[in-house]
Amino acid sequence: MKKYFTENNTDVSLRVQNGLTKVFTCPTEAYQHARQTGSYHYPLYGVKGGFAGYAVPK
């Protein structure tokens, strides 16, 4: 399982695994999905702090 973190170093890996947060690599897709679901998007980072994509919570 991949590990995902927010910019505040909060681990959101379980939320992604449980389907409560969706991960996107394209910022436009993340933005559109967030608008459709009435949510928001934020950047995700990997274990070493590298950029891993965008997240949209449910």
Image (cartoon, helix red, strand yellow):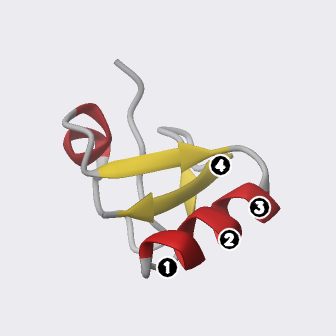
How much space separates mark 4 and mark 2, taking CA atoms? Answer: 12 Å
Q: Quadrant of residue 19?
A: top left
Q: Are marks 2 and 3 in contact (CB under 8 Å)?
A: yes
Please state, as top left, top right, bottom left or bottom right, where the C terminus lies in the image: bottom left
Q: How far from the left and from the top, in percent, is residue 15?
A: 23, 47
Disc 3 crowd, CA 10 A, few/some/many (<14, 14-19, 20+): some
Disc 1 crowd, CA 10 A, few/some/many (<14, 14-19, 20+): some
Tell which tag, 4 or 3, sits nearer the viewer: 3
Residue situated furthest front in the rendering: 36
Identify the secondary structure beneath mark 3. Answer: helix
Residue topped by disc 2: 31
Q: Amino acid at mark 4?
A: Gly
Q: Does label 4 or label 2 sit earlier along the sequence? A: 2
Q: Residue at x 52, y 45 (%)?
A: 23
Q: In the visual, does 58 lie left or right of 30?
A: left
Q: Are marks 1 and 4 in contact (CB under 8 Å)?
A: no
Q: Amino acid at mark 2?
A: Tyr
Q: How far from the left and from the top, in percent, is residue 37?
A: 44, 71
How much space separates mark 4 and mark 3, taking CA atoms? Answer: 8 Å
Identify the secondary structure beneath mark 2. Answer: helix
Identify the secondary structure beneath mark 4. Answer: strand
Disc 4 crowd, CA 10 A, few/some/many (<14, 14-19, 20+): some
Residue topped by disc 3: 27
Identify the secondary structure beneath mark 1. Answer: loop
Please state, as top left, top right, bottom left or bottom right, where the N terminus lies in the image: top left
